[in-house]
Image (spheres, helix red, strand yellow):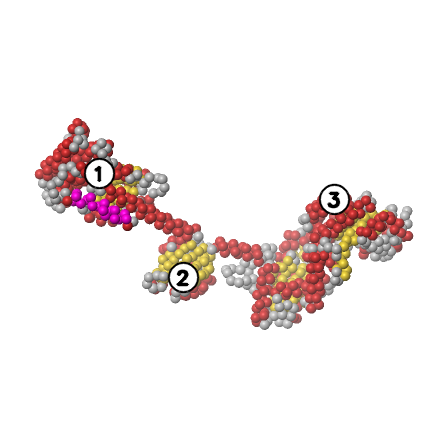
Amino acid sequence: MENNKKMLDTASSPLAPQLAACEQPEVVLDLAVLMSLPGVSQRRDAPVLKRLLGIFVVETSRSVGLLQAALEHGDREQVGRLAHRMKSSALAIGALHLGTEARRLDSSLKAGSPLDPADGGIIAAAWRDARQALLDEGLLGADELRSIEASIGS
Amino acid sequence: MTGTRKIHVLIVDDDPLTRLMASEALRESGYTSVEAEDGLRALALFDSERPDLVLLDVMMPRLGGFDVCQHLRARPEGQLVPIIMLTGLDDGESVERAFQVGATDFISKPINWTLLRFRIRYVLRSAQVMQELVRNKESLSSAQRIARLGSWEWFVTEDRVQRSAQYYRLFGQQPETFGERMEALLDHVYKPDRPMVQAALKGAAKGLGYQLTYRVVWPDGSVRTVLETAEPAEGGVGLLLEGSVQDITEQVDTQRRIRQLAYFDPLTGLPNREFFRESLLSAVARCLRNDSRCAVMVLDIDRFARINDSLGPERGDQVLQVIGHRLRESMGDRTPAEPAGGGGLPRLKVARLAADEFGVLVSDVGPVDEVIEVAYRLLDVVRAPIRVPGQEITLAARVGVAMMPEHATEADALLKAAETALNRAKRSTGEQVALFSEEMKVAAFLRFTLEGDLRRAIGEEELQVVYQPIVDLNGPRIAKVEALVRWAHLARGTVPPPEFISLAEETGMIVPLTRAVIEQVCSDIVHMGDALPPDFRVSVNLSGVNFMDPQLIPTIRAVLGAAQVPPSRIEFELTETVLMRDLDYATTTLAQLREMDIRVAVDDFGTGYSSLAYLRRLAVNTLKIDRSFIGELHDSQGLAIVEAVIGLARSLGMDVVAEGVETPAQLEVLRERGCHLIQGYLFARPMSRQALLQLLAGGAAVLPQRAALRPD
C-alpha cells in the first residue's frame, strides 16, 4: 500500500510540463504525448493511433464550426461546453496550443468574462496549426484528412 | 474480481476520444470494457453488464456524472462498485461533489494513463477488502439468524440500548414495537419469569454479568424459551454491557420430551421408578439433614394378570390408570405430569414402579401406626369398585412398608426394604400390609446370596439333572422320564427346587438355567444312545418365563441341533396357567413345537384354569394329573375329579399321566380307570443317568415295585 502511494506521487509528476505549458508559447503538437497514448506505445503505425486521430479530427473540426456559430449567436453555454470538450481532447492527444486556447476560453467564461467573437478566429487558427502539424508529421495523409472532413461536411 | 474472470469496466464519457483512449488503456492492463456515451446509457449498461468498476465523466449531456453516480449508489449491486470520476484538472468543486455523491476516487483530465492504471488497481483492491468485510458481516448476521442469536449493547449510564435486528425477531417484535429502554424487555417476558429477569437487570446495571434462561411471550401469545448471556464490556464512557439472546425453545422441548420419557410412565402419566428413586434420594438426604423420618410404601395389585387375561390388556391399562389417579388423589399428590420451567424435581408422592406396582413416598411422617394407617387407607382406595364397560370389578392389593431411619438410611435400601415387606405380604395369606423387619432382612439377604450362588451354579456340576421314570403299565415298561434339576449347594447342601426355581423365575435366570438343563438332557440322550427304546422321550419343564421368551424356539433348535438329538426324543411340560396367559401366543408356539415333532404335556392339570375349549385348541399331547388329586383318591370327590380328567383326556385323544403315585392302592384305582402312565415313588424316585441306564438295561424286571404290577 505504502509502495503504491509512492508510485502514485511520482506518477503525478508528468503533469508538471503540461501545467507549465500554460504560461509559455505552446508546442502545436507534442509528439511525446501522442506517442505515449494508450495503445500507441511509441509506434507511428499503431492502428489505434489512426483511429484516435480520426476521431480527434472529426470531433474537433465539428466543434470548431459549432463554436464559431455559437459565438455568433451569443450562445454562451454552448461555447463553454464546446471549449471544455475541445480542451480535454486536444490536451489529451498533445495538441497543446489548441488545448491551451480552448482551456483559456473555458476558464474565462467560467470566470464570467463576456463572449468575445475574436475567440472563434483564435481557436480556428490553433486548429489549423494542429491539423497542419499532423500532416507534416505524416501521421495523417492529406487524402485521409479530406475524406474525413468531407464526411462531416465541414 | 474473482479468479480467472477479467475485470470489466464501464467507461462513461460523451467524448469518443476519451472513451477510445480509456478502453485502450484498460485493454493494455488486461481489463475488458464497455462504453457509454451518456448517463442514461450508462445506467442501462451498468444493469446489464454488471461492471467491476466505473470510469465516469462529470460533464455529460442529458444525465450528468454526479447524477449517474448517485443513481448507481442507490442500486443494491451498485453500493460497493468502485466509481472513478473524471474531473477537470483544477476543478476542486467537482472533486468535492464527486465524493459527496459517492465516488470512490477521481482522476483529472487530461488523464495520465499510467496514473489511471494505478488508481484502478488500488480501488479494485480496496473494493475487494470491502466486499470481504461485507460478506463477513453478512455471514455473521446470517449465522446469528440461523443460530437464532440476537445481540444487544446496553449503555447503562444513559439507559440506551442497541439491539440487533435478529434480537427483535426472537421476541416476534419489530424495533418500533419493542420499546427502547432496557426495562422494555420485561414487557415481553413471561410473567412468572419477570422477577428473575428484573433481578438480573438490576445486577447488570451495577456491572454484573449474568446467564439466564427465561420465557418470552410473542404477540400471538406463544411462549418461547431463550437463553441470555450478559457481561460487562470495555466501552468508552460509562458502563457498557454486552449481551446475546438465543432461542432454545426446541432444545428445551426436546429435553422435556426426553425427561418425560425418562421419568414418567406413559400409561398413567405418573412418575416412573427412576423418578421415584431420585425423589427418594433427595427425600432421604432431607430426612438426614432435618433429623426427620420418611416412609416408603410399595403397593401391588392382587392377581392383576387375571384382569389382563379376562378383560384384555386395554381394560387392564384403564384399571391401572384409575388406580394411579386414585392413589394420587388420596395422597394429595400434585406433582405435575410435566413439570414447567427448569428447577429441580418437584416433591413426588406416588409413582408407578412396575406393571401393577405403585410406590408411595411419605415425607416427614409420625410414628409407625400413622404410616400403617395410611397404608390401609390406600388399600381402601384400591378396593373401591371400578366400573369398566359392562361390569364392575373389585380389586385387592398388598402393601409393603419400610421406614427411614428405622429400616434403612439409604434410598435404594429403603425401597428394597419396602419391596421385601411387600413380598412377605404377598406370600402370606391374611396379611395385607407388612412392615419391614430384621427377620425379613435376613431372609432377603439369604435370598440375595442364593441368587449369586445360583448364577454361578448354572452350567456347573452343582446343578444336576436327574430323571424320574414314567412307567407304562401296558408292558410294563419305562415309557419316558421327567428331567428334574437338583441343586447340591456346596455350602448349604441341597436347596429345595421350589425355592431356587422361583428365585430363578423372578430374576430371569430361569432362561439360562433351562437352557443348561436341556443341554444336559441332550448330552445324556446322546450318551445313552441305543439303550433308549425307540419311542422313549425325556420330558423337560418349561416355566412361564421360558415360554414367553421370544428366543425359546430358536434356542431349542440350536441346542438340539448342536447335540444332534432328534426332537422326537423331547417333551415339554407346561402348567395350564402358563398356557392360559396368552392363548393366541400359546397356540402358535405349541403348533411350532408340534411341527418339530416335540410333544407337550400339561403339568399340574386340574389346579388352574381348566377349560375344555383351550385344550381343544392347543396342540397338547398329554395331561398330567396333579399329585394333589392322586393324594385324594381315597375320597369320592377326589376320585370323581381324576375320573373326569381321565375321561377328558381319552375323549380328546390325549395321554394321561398320574403324578405322585406312592401306594399300590392309588395305582390300582388308576389302572382300573384306564390311566396306565404312572409317575411316582411307588416305582421310582428321580435318579441319575447312570441309574436310569441300569434300570433301562434291566427292563421292567428291575422296577422296585414290580410285585404291584399285575399285567392284564
Residue found at x 57% / y 70%: B289
Disc sitting over residue B564 in the figure: 3
Q: Which residue is mark 2?
A: B231
Q: Amino acid at mark 1?
A: Ser
Q: Nearer the viewer, residue B404 or B587?
A: B404
Q: Is residue B170 left or right of residue A103?
A: right
Is label 3 in a helix, a strand or a loop?
Answer: loop
What range of the chain is rendered magenta?
Answer: A3-19
Q: How many marks?
A: 3
Q: Amino acid at mark 2?
A: Glu
User: Residue B91: x percent and y percent?
Assistant: 19, 46
Image position of A59 with respect to B441: above or below: above
Is label 1 in a helix, a strand or a loop?
Answer: loop
Residue B54: image quadrant is top left
Going from N to C along the chain, the mark reached first, 2 or 3, is: 2
Residue under disc 2 on the same chain as residue under disc 3: yes
Query: Residue A10 lies in magenta, yes or no?
Result: yes
Q: Nearer the viewer, mark 3 or mark 1?
A: 1
Quadrant location of the N terminus of chain B? top left
Image position of B701 with respect to B431: above or below: above
- Which chain is home to disc 2? B
User: Residue A53: x percent and y percent?
Assistant: 20, 33
Q: Is residue B221 visible?
A: no
Query: Residue B383 lies in magenta, yes or no?
Result: no
Helix, strand or loop for the magenta stretch, by majority? helix
- Which chain is home to disc 1? A
Q: Nearer the viewer, residue B639 or B235?
A: B235
Q: Nearer the viewer, mark 2 or mark 3?
A: 3
Q: Is residue B28 visible?
A: yes
Marks 2 and 3 sit apart, C-alpha to C-alpha, by 76 Å
Disc sitting over residue A36 in the figure: 1
User: Residue A93: x percent and y percent?
Assistant: 19, 37
